[in-house]
Image (cartoon, rainbow, N blue to C red):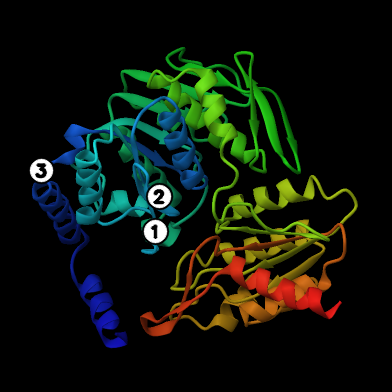
Amino acid sequence: MVVINRIKTKVRKMVPESVIGWYHLGMALLGALRYGFPAKKIKVIGVTGTNGKSTTVIMIAKILEEGGFRVAVSSSVEFRIGDKIWKNKSRMTMPGRFALQKLLSDAVTAKCQYAVIEVSSEGIKQHRHRFIDFEAAVVTNVTAEHIEAHGSFGNYLTAKGKLFAACRNIHVVNLDDPNYEYFAKFGAKEKYAYTLGAAEADSQKEAKTVCADNFKVSGTGSSFEVEKTEFNLKLLGKFNIYNALAAISVGLSQGVDLDACKAALAKIEVIPGRMDQAVSHPFKVFIDYAVTPDSLEKAYQAIRGDLRGGRLICVLGSCGGGRDKWKRPVMGNLAKKYCDQVVVTNEDPYDEDPMKIINEIASGGGKVKKIIDRRAAIREALACAKPGDSVLVTGKGCEDSMCLSGGKKIPWSDKSVIKEEFSILENKR
């Protein structure tokens, strides 16, 4: 396996980028041909952005189902066709061209009216979005990520924009995101701009504004109003209000009224691996996917805002494989800024030296514990916690494996390990 991976890497370096692009485009066409261009027979909602894609996809699907539609889903958390749900174990946010076209084909066969899919920048770069007729394009937010893969933030943003260029029907854009104007420039038959009310209405007066008024965030969820309809979310964090607004905008664009949107969102108890509570007493323990500085900071802020005198203890790492090394010290500094105790550990090192990654995260001094074994790191964090404290374990979310060198994967679940170690700790007390 190691030899094969090395050969693949060398071949990619030798082949011109343009040739690789044509290869990916050709594969996208073959996939669509193989399954009879299924996207022409179903309405496809594409959701892109740096953070919040999975949550927004699941929210949109729930709203459409509440509106009486049969829905298929493709997210980094799960796949779904109607009532059939299975976990995404591929570690790909957006499936390969044949897999995605097959999912859409199966959804058509199952008489689904909608498919809601995550659209990643890497997927767009590899033309996985091609030959799909999008009913709507949604963007959550765009912050620095995958810079090595794209060459620059500008290229990364441009990749996201290609979804909007491919969809000429409905666009849903975050009015409060710094990159709003970039996405607003793409032409569409109908535009929606969502906001927490901090921004002015769309300056071009082209978009229908979906605004959250009187929003409140607590340790049990959040509440807000849209056109006098009160929404209550069980999901933590201000960022989940934004995700909900994006989903509500899609619902409204498809004729689902606010009451149905409200009912749908109230039914969502948790998004697996996203601010997912593993322990509730005597201290709280959460797991969250958070692999970018922006998502990590928002997760810390969400918990910190409800500590009420307790401490925040965090366990974090960073992915290897040479990807986005720049963010490692940034994430380490954020942990030191928001957390009272920081434990840095292994995540998915791939072919990199795990200790080197840990040292890069922990650079810059400060009180940081470095524990390479992830189970031992979680055990240490739980042992440090006292009643009223909160522990946040980030980077893996609901993933069920850890990627090591030579393409090796070992079974892993943050949530299971937390529950096991917490049980051992409780039995000792």
- Whether residue 177 is visible here, answered yes or no, is no
Secondary structure at numbered mark 3: loop
Mark 3 residue type: Gly
Mark 1 residue type: Asn
Point 69% across, 29% down: residue:
223
Front-most of residues 298 and 22: 298
Residue at mark 3: 36
217 relative position to 386: left or right: left
Mark 2 residue type: Ser
Residue at mark 1: 88
Q: Are marks 2 and 1 in contact (CB under 8 Å)?
A: yes
Nearer the N terminus, badge 3 or badge 2? 3
Q: Which mark is residue 75?
A: 2
Task: In the rendered view, tell whether residue 349 sits above or below residue 130.
Answer: below
Residue 251: percent from the left, percent from the top? 44, 25
Residue density around tag 1, few if under 14, some if 14–19, many if 20 or more, within 10 Å: many
Residue 85: percent from the left, percent from the top? 39, 51
Give the quarter of the figure containing the C terminus.
bottom right
Q: Which mark is residue 267?
A: none
429 relative position to 76: left or right: right
